[in-house]
Image (tube, helix red, strand yellow):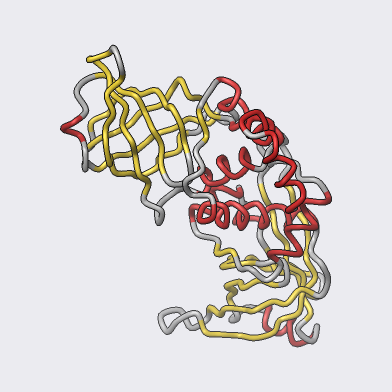
């Protein structure tokens, strides 16, 4: 997990405290949520539950109310604690913490499983900074992906290292056919890659850009469409392809990678070299 400053955490809480994050498979993968270690604690006991969504002020969870949990909630006057757990790549022990909450409402999950209910939790205090950071980074990445969609990052050895991207080990699959490529630039909305061979016949084809993250050697697939090709001067055997991403299917890990870089000191330094007045303007706006 990236380390956020107290100023960043305060900004996340101020700007995004009421924004809900739904824990889809993609979000669970990006946050390293450990679903088997998520519980609702009440009257000294813990019951396994599923986190459906969470914000910095509350959460919605799915619980089996045909268990002793129902009686415990009544005894506690709806006061509970939500236990969350996240794996940590650089540590053997997970990051776990409790958030005090009160149950504000119940909703049946569905007719097929009448024992399951959505429980709406309202936190009774500000949650731990760890949760604010996890949710804040996700929301910030989603917000930036819309606001800064066209802001391109030239991929160099320095910028790739700052992003945690192995730019020398990239593949682009076009109509299912794998091709090695060199990534020239990336953004929230697309990328430019260089491939061997004729490229003009590849325009409008479905593609998938496969990137490797250096920290974990994990591969991230980004669905895309080839929207144009550009000849490379002096080289008839290679061409540059412009890829446009499908905004609905961009992996959360990719968004976090781009957002983390754009908000980094390295990105500010590079932008300042291009436009010395820009960094000052950004600092004043923040």
In percent of width and height, residue 204 lies at 21, 43
Please indicate whether residue 110 sits to the left or right of residue 197 in the image. Answer: right
In this view, the residue in front, 229 or 215, is: 229
Please indicate whether residue 170 sits to the left or right of residue 16 in the image. Answer: left
In percent of width and height, residue 87 lies at 66, 45
Picture quadrant where residue 44 is located:
bottom right
In percent of width and height, residue 276 lies at 69, 34
Task: Check the image and name the residue furthest to the top.
Answer: 234
Please indicate whether residue 107 sits to the left or right of residue 99 in the image. Answer: left
Position above or below: 228 against 217 = below
In this view, the residue in front, 86 or 174, is: 174
Q: How many marks?
A: 0
Quadrant of image for the N terminus: top right
Position above or below: 154 against 100 = above
Task: Check the image and name the residue furthest to the left.
Answer: 201
What residue is drawn where x is 61% and y is 54%? 138
In percent of width and height, residue 36 lies at 61, 55
What residue is drawn where x is 49% and y is 55%? 25
In this view, the residue in front, 142 or 41, is: 142
What residue is drawn where x is 29% and y is 39%? 207
What residue is drawn where x is 61% and y is 85%? 106
């Amino acid at each position: 997990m990236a380390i956020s400053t107290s100023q960043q955490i305060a900004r996340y809480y101020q700007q995004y405290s009421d924004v809900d994050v739904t824990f889809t498979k993609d979000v669970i993968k990006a946050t390293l949520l450990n679903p088997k270690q998520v519980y609702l604690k009440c009257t000294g006991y813990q019951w396994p539950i599923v986190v459906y969504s969470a914000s910095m002020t509350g959460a919605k969870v799915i619980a089996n109310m045909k268990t002793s949990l129902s009686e415990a909630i009544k005894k506690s006057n709806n006061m509970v604690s939500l236990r969350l757990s996240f794996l940590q790549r650089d540590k053997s022990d997970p990051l776990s913490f409790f958030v005090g909450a009160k149950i504000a409402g119940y909703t049946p999950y569905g007719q097929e499983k009448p024992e399951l209910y959505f429980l709406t939790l309202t936190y009774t205090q500000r949650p731990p900074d760890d949760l604010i950071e996890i949710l804040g980074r996700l929301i910030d990445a989603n917000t930036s992906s819309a606001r800064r969609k066209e802001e391109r990052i030239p991929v160099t050895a320095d910028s790739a290292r700052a992003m945690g991207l192995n730019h020398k080990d990239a593949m682009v699959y076009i109509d299912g056919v794998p091709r090695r490529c060199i990534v020239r630039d990336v953004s929230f909305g697309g990328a430019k890659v260089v491939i061997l061979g004729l490229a003009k016949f590849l325009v409008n084809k479905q593609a998938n850009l496969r990137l490797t993250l250096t920290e974990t050697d994990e591969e991230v697939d980004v669905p895309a469409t080839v929207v144009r090709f550009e000849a490379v001067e002096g080289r008839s055997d290679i061409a540059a392809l412009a890829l446009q991403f499908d905004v609905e299917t961009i992996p959360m890990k990719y968004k976090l990678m781009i957002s983390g870089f754009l908000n980094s000191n390295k990105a500010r330094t590079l932008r300042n070299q291009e436009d010395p007045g820009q960094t000052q303007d950004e600092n004043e706006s923040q």
